[in-house]
Image (cartoon, rainbow, N blue to C red):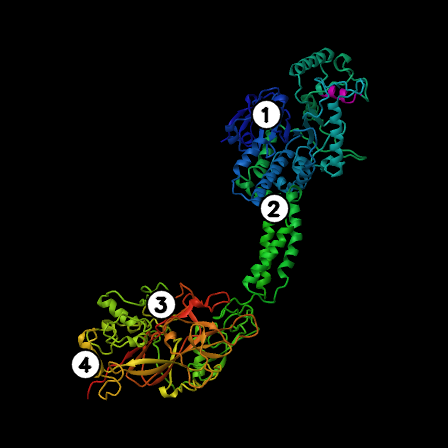
Amino acid sequence: MKRNVYAGEMALTVSVGELLESEVIEDPLYKDEGLCVLGIFGKTAKQPGSPKEFLINTLADKHIYPLFGLTESDHQNSSSLIEAYYCQETRVLYLVLTSVCDNRQLLRACESLSLGVGHSDAHDFWKGADKQHCLALLYLFSLCHVLLLVHPTCCFDVTYDRLFRALDALRQKVLPLLRAAIKESNISKEWRVNCRPCPPRLLFVFQMNGVLRCTGGNGSDVPGGNGDNKPKKHSPRRRLQHALEDQIYRIFRKSRVLTNQSSNCLFTVPANQAFVYVVPGPGEDPVGAVLGQLRSNCALRDNDTNTLVSGPRRYQHMRHSARQPSFNIEGSSLSGGQLVDCSLKEFLWQHVELVLTKKGFDDSVGRNPQPSHFELPTYSTWAQVAHRLHQVMIADGAEEETAELAVKVQGQLKVLEGFLDADAKFSENRCQKALPLAHSAYQSNLPHNYTTTVHKNQLTQALRVYSQHARGVAFQRYALQLHEDCYKFWSNGHQLCEERSLTDQHCVHKFHLLPQPGEKTDMDRNPPILNHNSRGRSTSSCNCGRKQAPREDPFDIQAANYDFYQMLEEKCCEKLERIDFPVFQPGTPDPAPACEEASGPPEAPVPLPLSGSEPELGPSEGEQLKESIPVSHPVSHTPGESTSLSLALSLGQSTDSLGPYGDGGGGEGHEKRPSLVDRQASTVEYLPGMRHSGCLKGLLPKFSSWSLVKLGPAKAYNPHTGLEQPGFLTGSSFLLPWDVVIRSRSEEDIGLSEPLDGGASSWPAPNKSLAGKRGNAGGLGRGRRRDDVARAFVGFEYEDSRGRRFFSSGPDKVVKVLGPGGVKEPATRALNTDMPLYIPSPAQGRGLKPHYAQLARLFIIVPDAPLEITLNPQVQPGPAPCPVFHPEQTEVVLPPDGMWVLRFPYSYVTESGPCYPPKENQPLASYKVLRGILRANTASPLPPQ
């Protein structure tokens, strides 16, 4: 519903949208008369208030705008960029355009910007405001007869030349859309085709900013120090106006904003009338300025005898007085012979009268000037056209029938970018020149196929080169394009396979797919179907160590720890006796790998007891210690035991010496706690990696990464010649001797019956020989009781990537036998310490990179004696928090009279990924086999038959 507004009662300005939406009730005397539309736009100075708004106060002789501008509430309520004031008496409609060039809109725009806005986003914001300002300015050029450009200084801003060229290009683009918007309006054909009532005349109003300080209050010259007191015909302000007119006309003609035919131009300027006015600044003597203004008004009234002479004709007499001396010249008492400067209202009214008298503007020049169309519409006709254009250009299609046209008009604003966005255009050119340089920097020294790390390094170098040359708001957009271009180049046949082998080597193939089971490789497909290959080859031995063969660098745990050894087992150790470790037995046709969150908590690593005395433990804790205590850790013993057995006790303990925690075979009253592998294993889910201290309970892998085979009886090993297997270095194929004490129960009883408390009964009687002394046939030997020692042999075998093998007798110590007789050093040190998993190979190559040998096998010679040797390997292949790996069966009792070989895994893999071998700068002490790998116990005697 439209609101009624009485034109005669309009005392304040309203937004043009509100004016067009309301119904203006005019006085019947003026209803059928024509209407002159005057548009005002431009920039404002830094002083409070807007000179553009004050111009309406001057022109309408009314106090329409407050002295200090609009209040804050008015700022918030003004939703339109164009404000309107209709003066019905003078038949002039004023349209004032405010933009970011004005203080009020500039402050509001700055407040709308947040602190975190980047440079590019802020630039887009300001350029969006410029585009909307241009569209509103084109709206004025399509509806106004006269346009007034207001500038806060007395120097012409040449950026208006670019602005007007942009507006002209935009008008040509949107002209068909504007014609479609006003085709239903009741206007003439010329107006409908050109979408404007006439080519508007553009006038310029500049403000004096203190440049001309040599003028007095009335504009006359103040005598200077040069002695020339002769008055000039034109005041300095008028001469400045003439100079600005010549400058502006020359600039617009050169840039072809103004042409000979005014109907083809965005606007026109008069050929024989002044179109520049300089508003005088405030004088130093305000009282004198007021008195001078009064004298001018009185002199004008006395000399103006003809009441029909209006302001414009008087201004023409003064403007062309040099060529027409018959015009009135003021007396010398007032201005010293100079022409009196006109007021702003007189300057403007000569152009407004041409509109109101329907004479129009004849601003075409040249030999054959073409007359331009001109119309003086009534307010109702003008409001109808203005409302349709407002819906398309300003209101963004508030009505449904104009919404599509509004979207199309907004889409044509791209034409302004080439004219207004000079800094963006410069940035575009700079970034476009920097982009090829960045591409060259990316592709320099590149292999044909490369990894993600190389891609990122080259991209960083390309961005560094790009940032050295690129500038401006387009920097980020072209940087993203550089990212995309480099990624496309990399992924288009240059991407290397990112898979790493278990030895931390990259696959050398370009990006490819793995063949499915039963599928053949195909190089011609895109991407090709290939198996991983790092071009790394090494030499390894089989499970028993009797046969060596080359192997490819493995990429999965099955190829590393199972397939290679299965292939050699068919040729070498297939018929050997072995102890199989438990593996997964599927109970369903499609078993699935277990997830980390599948079931219960991970098994805790087996704790190692401290050396020395142990505190009292409960029955359950004692049983746990009984299962986990290694032989290398001595435990407390009673004083009744011989101190000469300390070495034997440190290597292997008897059932009695271990007390209640001993692992006596078949002992009564101590039930052994079942291990994890004794529990029911899952038949639905399998373990995707290897068994370790952090994996889930009740899960087994599909295959075992460990192997335990028997090469033969104990006598198959000759300690004088060592092992006769390929690959061993000279003198390093000898096992370490391990003497284990064996005691019979009757001898222990005899020994324990002798008191050893140091009392009188422990000393021999006089004249009696001590039992066991030499020459006493009935003695028990040299000691207090008979001890039998069984000799076992142990060997920690290391093997490097070239197949060179050797035994180690301790950390960083290689077994080396130069003469006959075998190894003299016992296995005590090796069994009582953490053996390293990797040690430097004694046969280093010529390169600077060191070669490491990995613990590959453990040889155990179990003698034919009443002895049980328990195998409990635990490997930590990395620094904490790396888990501890162990076989699927944590403890294995080796039968007597055998030559057993435990083959360690080639690679250690968890569910999270592989544990890579150490690098050059990593300490080898973190990669170790925990002590307690072997434990010797006396076997229980067989019951009598």
> What whole-number distance in Å separates the C-alpha atoms at marks 1 and 2?
43 Å
Name the residue that disc number 4 marks: 766
Q: Earlier in the sequence, mark 1 or mark 3?
A: 1
Q: Dot 3: few (<14), some (14–19), or many (≥20) neighbours within 10 Å?
A: some
Q: Quadrant of the C terminus?
A: bottom left
Q: Earlier in the sequence, mark 4 or mark 3?
A: 3
Q: Which mark is residue 86?
A: 1
Give the mark toward the camera: 1 or 3.
3
Amino acid bearing label 1: Tyr
**Residue 313 shown in magenta:** yes
| Residue 134 image point, x, y percent | 62, 38
**Res. 252 image quadrant:** top right
Contact (CB < 8 A) between labels 3 and 2? no
Q: Which mark is residue 693?
A: 3
Give the mark toward the camera: 2 or 4.
4
Outermost residue, top direction? 302
Q: Dot 2: few (<14), some (14–19), or many (≥20) neighbours within 10 Å?
A: many
> What whole-number distance in Å separates the C-alpha atoms at marks 2 and 4?
113 Å
**925 on left or right of 55:** left
Q: Earlier in the sequence, mark 1 or mark 2?
A: 1
Contact (CB < 8 A) between labels 4 and 1? no
**843 on left or right of 329:** left
Name the residue that disc number 2 marks: 473
**Res. 173 image quadrant:** top right
Give the mark toward the camera: 4 or 1.
4
Task: Identify the magenta region.
Answer: 312-321
Q: Earlier in the sequence, mark 3 or mark 2?
A: 2
Amino acid bearing label 4: Pro
> What whole-number distance in Å separates the C-alpha atoms at marks 4 and 1?
148 Å
> What whole-number distance in Å separates the C-alpha atoms at marks 1 and 3?
90 Å
